Amino acid sequence: MLPFISGTELKQYLPYPMLIEALRKTFTQVNHAPLRHAHRVSEPGPTTLLIMPVWQESKQLGLKVVTVAPENRGQGLPTVHALFILMDTATGVPIALMDGEQLTLRRTAAASALASDYLSRKESQHLLLVGTGRLAPHMTIAHCMMRPIQHVSVWGRNSHSVAQTAEALRKEGLPEHITIIESHDLSQSAQQADIICCATTSKEPLIFHDWVKPGTHIDLVGGFRPDMREADDELMRHAQIFVDTVEGTLAEAGDLIQPIQKGLITSGAIRAELADLTTDRHAGRLNNDDITVFKSVGTAIEDLCAASLAWDSWKLTR
């Protein structure tokens, strides 16, 4: 029977320091990740089906199948369900099945933390987390691995969810010196933050240029469709923009697509993608006063990296 690696096991096999460094190495290698298929399951229903293939010619092949159903929140269900299939590239033989949700949560957070290592100021101490979904605690933990964070502010539209997320963070084993703050004023918290991490499915901007102080790093994770936004046009006009992959973000990221369509920026505003940062083709942050933006829509390269790492660790336990 094909082995199944559960979400609980993935937590054990994919500690953030190890996963971040594995991603750093992976983005220096040759990877093949065609643009993912994105389908609305029904119109005008909100559920989206994503299909993401990826492979390395001399190593492994993977396919992730994801459903995103935002209305699940009202039923107390996760908004994202996913399954990852790991295969041998040469033979096509399936190797393992993995919980795709936990894989996605961890690789997404690790990719943002990797980008922050190149783009946020090294002395960054205040992290603002915008969003209270299942990704929120993962983003916080991963970011805290890369910078000397002292304060984490949590903001969401629902005060009860903010309190729940703050409590979850207190139980996550963050260093005792980190203070968790429940934010009820997004603009004020944004003005105080050194790093702003947005993990929402918002269709309207949440973070505005006028709120952001010089030197801030902004991590835009949530939007994965052209109709989704987390930052306003002025912020995108003035920021130094970096992405996980140029091809993916220009096809899917509303934070880029919408200002490009308005003629406010061009695709040339993208300074570099993760592969450029990890191979030193671009140095990342060049000035302490720059506002940097890392926009990610997710790439299957990260999934394959995490799955391969988990598979290697799983084999050692057998």
Image (spheres, rainbow, N blue to C red):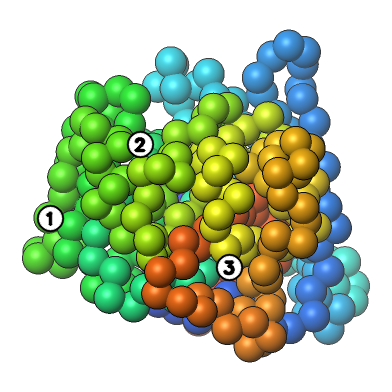
Q: Which residue is mark 1?
A: 179
Q: With 231 as the anchor, is 88 left or right in this view?
A: right
- Horizontal and vertical percent for residue 185? 24, 32
Q: How many marks?
A: 3
Q: Amino acid at mark 1?
A: Thr
Is residue 119 depicted above or below 300 in this figure? Answer: below
Could you tell me residue 318's position as x and y percent?
A: 51, 76
Q: Secondary structure at mark 2?
A: loop
From where the camera sits, is residue 215 visible? Answer: yes
Task: Look at 24% across and 40% down and name the residue there.
Answer: 188
Q: Which residue is mark 2?
A: 132
* Residue linked to disc 3: 306
The answer to whether residue 10 is left or right of residue 34 is left
Q: Earlier in the sequence, mark 1 or mark 3?
A: 1
Query: Quadrant of residue 214 in the image?
Result: bottom left
Residue that appears at 83% across and 69% down? 32
Earlier residue among tags 3 and 2: 2
Question: In the figure, residue 283 lies in which quadrant?
Answer: bottom right
**Real-space CA distance between mark 3 and mark 2, rounded to the nearest whole angstrom:** 24 Å
Q: Few, some or many C-alpha atoms within 10 Å of disc 2 (few <14, some 14-19, many ≥20)?
A: many
Question: Mark 3 falls on what kind of element?
Answer: helix
Front residue (pair 129, 67): 129
Q: Residue 165 location, x and y as percent?
A: 26, 39
Crowding at dot 1, Cα within 10 Å, few <14 / some 14-19 / many 20+, comes out as some
Select label 1 or label 3 by which is in front: 1
Q: Tag 3: residue type? A: Ala
